[in-house]
Image (cartoon, rainbow, N blue to C red):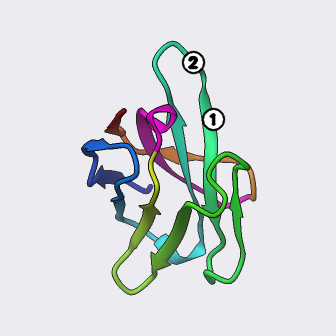
């Protein structure tokens, strides 16, 4: 069993940065870790993913070059550094963990990110 707790959300202006963090319990190092987001009135979508070693990372086209995912297996944390934020990045951001690439088994409760124009 893995429990995930997100933090770091908030209200920022367009162009500013935020860093989200996800703290995990359980056997963290063997999981693919991902960030998803759900904008108001829309479905939850993939944002970024990192493999257990940290050497492979994947990003949605909409965030490439602006967001960076990283992990610290010693601290059981995965972070999402978000730069050059846009109003369309406004969403609830969720941390997720999965053993199989592309198949999330565990989810956090989410943290709200609001970007004003």
Q: Residue at x 63, y 35 (%)?
A: 45
CA distance separating discs 2 and 1? 9 Å
Residue 92 point in image, percent of width and height: 40, 34
Task: From the image, tell me which residue sits under label 1.
Answer: 45
Residue 87 sits inside the magenta stretch: yes
Q: Nearer the viewer, residue 78 or 10?
A: 10
Q: Identify whether 116 is placed above or below 4.
A: above
Q: Percent position (x, y) of residue 79?
A: 42, 66
Quadrant where the image shows the C terminus: top left
Count residues near mark 2 (Cα–Cα under 10 Å), then give few for <14, some for 14-19, many for 20+.
Answer: few
**Is residue 9 within the magenta segment?**
no
At x 72% / y 76%, what residue is drawn?
56
The image quadrant where one finds the N terminus is bottom left
Q: Which mark is residue 42?
A: 2
Q: Looking at this view, is 50 or 112 the one in front?
A: 112
The picture places residue 35, in percent across and down from the top left corner, at 53, 51
Label for residue 6?
none
Q: Is residue 67 left or right of residue 6?
A: right
In the rendered structure, the answer to whether residue 54 lies left or right of residue 114 reads right
- Marks 1 and 2: in contact by CB < 8 Å? yes
Q: Circle 1 sits in a helix, a strand or a loop, which is it?
A: strand
Residue at (49% x, 26% y) in the render: 39
The residue most toward the top is 41
Magenta range: 86-100
Q: Using the image, determine if residue 88 lies above or below residue 31.
A: above
């Amino acid at each position: 069993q893995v429990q995930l707790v997100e933090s770091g959300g908030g209200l920022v202006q367009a162009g500013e940065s935020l860093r989200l963090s996800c703290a995990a319990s359980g056997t963290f190092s063997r999981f693919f870790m991902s960030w998803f987001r759900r904008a108001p009135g829309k479905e939850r979508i993939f944002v970024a993913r990192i493999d257990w070693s940290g050497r492979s990372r994947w990003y949605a086209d909409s965030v490439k070059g602006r967001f960076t995912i990283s992990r610290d297996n010693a601290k059981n944390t995965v972070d999402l550094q978000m730069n050059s934020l846009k109003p369309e990045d406004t969403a609830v951001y969720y941390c997720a963990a999965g053993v199989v690439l592309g198949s999330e088994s565990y989810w956090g409760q989410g943290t709200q990110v609001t970007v004003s124009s």
